[in-house]
Image (cartoon, grey):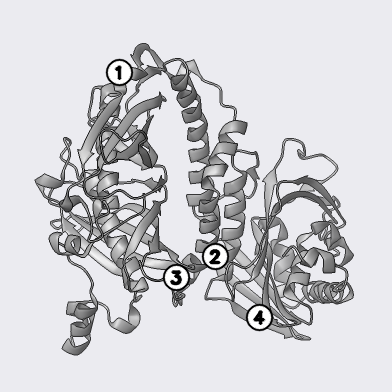
Amino acid sequence: MIQNVGSHLRRSFASVFSSRTSRKLASHSGDEGAMGDSKDDRNPTEVQMSQLVLPCHTNQRGELSVGQLLKWIDTTACLSAERHAGCPCVTASMDDIYFDHTISVGQVVNIKAKVNRAFNSSMEVGIQVTSEDLCSENQWTVCKALATFVAHQQLSKVKLKQITPRTEEEKMEHSVAAERRRMRLVYTDTIKDLLANCTVKDDPEIRDCSRTVPAEKTRVESVELVLPPHANHQGNTFGGQIMAWMENVATIAASRLCRAHPTLKAIEMFHFRGPSQVGDRLVFKAIVNNAFKHSMEVGVCVEAYRQEAEPRWRHINSAFMTFVVLDADDQPQKLPWIQPQPGDGERRYREAQARKKIRLDRKYIVSCKQAEVPLSVPWDPSNQVYLSYNNVSALKVLVAKDNWVLSSEINQVRLYTLEEDKFLSFHLEMLVHVDAAHAFLLLSDLRRRPEWDRHYRSVQLVQQVDDDDAIYHVISPSLGSDAKPQDFVILASRRKPCDNGDPYIIALRSVTLPTHPETPEYRRGETLCSGFCLWREGDQLTKVSYYNQATPGFLNYVTSNVAGLSSAFYSTFQACEHFLLDNRSDLAPSLQTL
């Protein structure tokens, strides 16, 4: 449901917000250390909230209720969105949330929210939640979240102004936000396709079959009457309140399975499908869909109706929540086996198994740091969307780095390097008198790369995944003293610009395919992050930039070029320029689809 936070809720919470007034006072006080950051150093959309956890905020374990935390998160994020939009904003969705730490009575919750990127009328807000112990001064990361808000005005259509990122972190978030938005827009269809194509077998050996609980025994149904304290100034139900009610019924369902006090560890995307108003009755339904060895999935559905006689209720929201049961040492306990009911119960049981695999793929591929991602990730239909996302976002993050150093320049081809952690990355850049869309089509088809790149001896298209993603098998000549040629299995993901000023993206990374295992004939090479960014500099002028995060097998070759002992980089890149110029008139029909 699309919801927003009214101004009366801002006054009712006993919170500490970073308002414009407080920053103005700080700038005039002359004591920035006492009042916080100066206005010039702070993101203008940033909002902070600090809450002291009191007994009234906790659950039966004496820990901060996740429902209460969701209210505070939604409030802080909405205030950040409204600060940027200058008008009321409504919650459209909340991405997956993973809770890494619980919060006890007496500790402080610190929530920071800022707008990562604005689109036409929607914007992505990034939220960070930490907790601190005031006595020991210890601090913990609780969770990170991403919320989408829509600016809402009754009399006119809203066109949001663009965010101007300033720091390296803001540039990264701004760039990757476009890719996250793309994934959000196809979220529902992606889940349906993955569930249809993902086959997961049940493993009875990991279950405690001595304890069996019928799924129907975990079913919960609860109704709430929406009153004025639950709504905003437009009369719509506060989104954070709905999420809190959903968490409440899900916890009850989980407790009926384990007969203990469960802990919520993850929430799969909240997507608000429509509004509800003061006077509506909201019906919350929850049931345990499946129990695994140490975790269980609870499905929650929310429907609304105005009058008892209404023939059809409105679907407001649905979510899936993952719970665990912790022992005295905070270790997960083994759970009973859930016995599904025939029909819909068995369907939910199978879908929960598939969703678990999808969640693990998504968390592993999307959430982990670039340094933690293996060079080659297995590709299959259940993770193709997230591998594509990781492929493009990794390149965008590399591009957004601030500390690139110009190493040399030959014939207007510039070579930049970046030394960071265990990676040495390089970046080549030149201007080419060709349209950016032409260059995008020519360079995104790897089958044509041997025409200009001597490092590509032959390229075979293995699978055209969709319009934007393809998998290739590349054979490359040997480097240095190695007698064997190399081969690569590469996922190529391409993206058109999201807004004016965005580049065309062609991202490349290694994947593994069962149909193309390593063979004695070739030495298997791997690439973690590489690709092209193409910026339109004029009508027939494009800035072509190539990026590569060098892997160990390629490192000696890279350092030889960086040190000036070889000019292979420059000759290859100039061959790319000639290729683009010679073929710029070949793609007129294809350009009509861009």
Whole-angstrom CA distance, mark 1 to mark 3, is 48 Å
Whole-angstrom CA distance, mark 2 to mark 4, is 21 Å
Q: Which residue is mark 4?
A: 407
Q: Nearer the viewer, mark 1 or mark 3?
A: 1
Whole-angstrom CA distance, mark 2 to mark 1, is 48 Å
N-terminal-most mark, 2 or 1: 1
Circle 1 packing at 10 Å, graded few (<14), some (14-19), many (20+), is some
* Number of marks in the rendered image: 4
Q: Which residue is mark 3?
A: 170
- Cβ–Cβ under 8 Å for marks 2 and 1: no
Locate residue 313, reporting x and y percent.
35, 37
Name the side, left or right, on which 192 lies relative to 560.
left
In front: 24, or 108? 24
Report the residue at 56% width, 37% height from top: 192
N-terminal-most mark, 4 or 3: 3
N-terminal-most mark, 2 or 3: 3
SS at circle 3? helix
SS at circle 2? helix
- Cβ–Cβ under 8 Å for marks 4 and 1: no
Circle 3 packing at 10 Å, graded few (<14), some (14-19), many (20+), is some
SS at circle 1? helix
Q: Which residue is mark 2?
A: 397
Q: Which residue is mark 1?
A: 217
The image shows residue 11, relative to residue 391, as above or below, that is below
